Image (cartoon, rainbow, N blue to C red):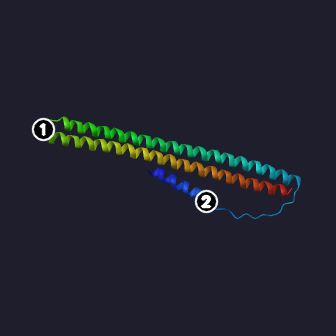
Amino acid sequence: MNKVLASLIAGLFATSVYAQTTATTTTTLPATKEVVKAEQEAVKDVAKAQEKEAKAVAKADEKSTKATAKATEKKAEAKSKALKKHADAREDVADADPEDKMKAEAKAEKKMAEANLKAEKKMIKADAKAEKVAVEAAEEKAIARAKTEKEKAEAAADIKKAATK
């Protein structure tokens, strides 16, 4: 749980840092061949970075969706097994002799409680695993966004560098 919490906090911190826009000053650069070439390369580099980010976001979303679907499936399976055990316990009570009815009911209640506990554990574990994958997906998205921002900054720096030549 500590690792999940730490990952969540780290992801939140990373997204908050990159969510803040930096104040950029726009200066008109002379349109020399070097500047035009640098601008064209910058546009290409930024487009590549944005494409990579989009792929990373899609991949992370897919992982998260798959994990959620798998958790839902496991939860449904656990509930189904518990209900089957409930039905078996009720059947045992119905088949019991009249003088053993109370004993059979007590045994059935215990069996149902154990089935419920087992189902709840499976459901909790499935949810925890899905949450862990969701946190990892958020982390991957934040990293992809940070890489795109880095590319944008490098591209702007390259344009300024070309203008000084």
Q: Pick the quarter of the image with the C terminus.
A: bottom right
Q: Position of residue 87 (x, y in %)?
A: 28, 38
Q: In this view, does 126 lie to the left or right of 63?
A: left
Q: Dot 2 lies on which element?
A: helix
Q: What residue type is labelled 1?
A: Pro
Q: Residue 98 carries which label?
A: 1
Q: Is residue 26 left or right of residue 94?
A: right
Q: Where is residue 21 in the image (x, y as percent from the top left)?
A: 66, 62
Give the residue drawn at x 48%, y 42%: 69
**Foreground residue, 14 or 54?**
54
Give the residue drawn at x 56%, y 58%: 13
Q: Is residue 144 left or right of residue 87?
A: right
Which numbered disc, 2 or 1, marks the residue closer to the eye?
1
Mark 2 vs 1, N-terminal side: 2
Q: What residue type is labelled 2?
A: Val
**Foreground residue, 71 or 158?**
71
Instruction: Confirm or deny contact between disc 2 and disc 1 (CB under 8 A).
Output: no
Q: In this view, does 70 lie to the left or right of 45?
A: left
Q: Dot 1 lies on which element?
A: helix
Q: Determine the image quadrant of residue 15.
A: bottom right
Label 2: few (<14), some (14–19) or many (≥20) C-alpha neighbours in 10 Å:
few
Q: Determine the image quadrant of residue 96.
A: top left
Label 1: few (<14), some (14–19) or many (≥20) C-alpha neighbours in 10 Å:
few
Q: Mark 2 points at which residue?
A: 17
Give the residue drawn at x 53%, y 47%: 136
Q: Residue 154 carries which label?
A: none
Q: Distance between the residues labelled 2 and 1?
A: 71 Å
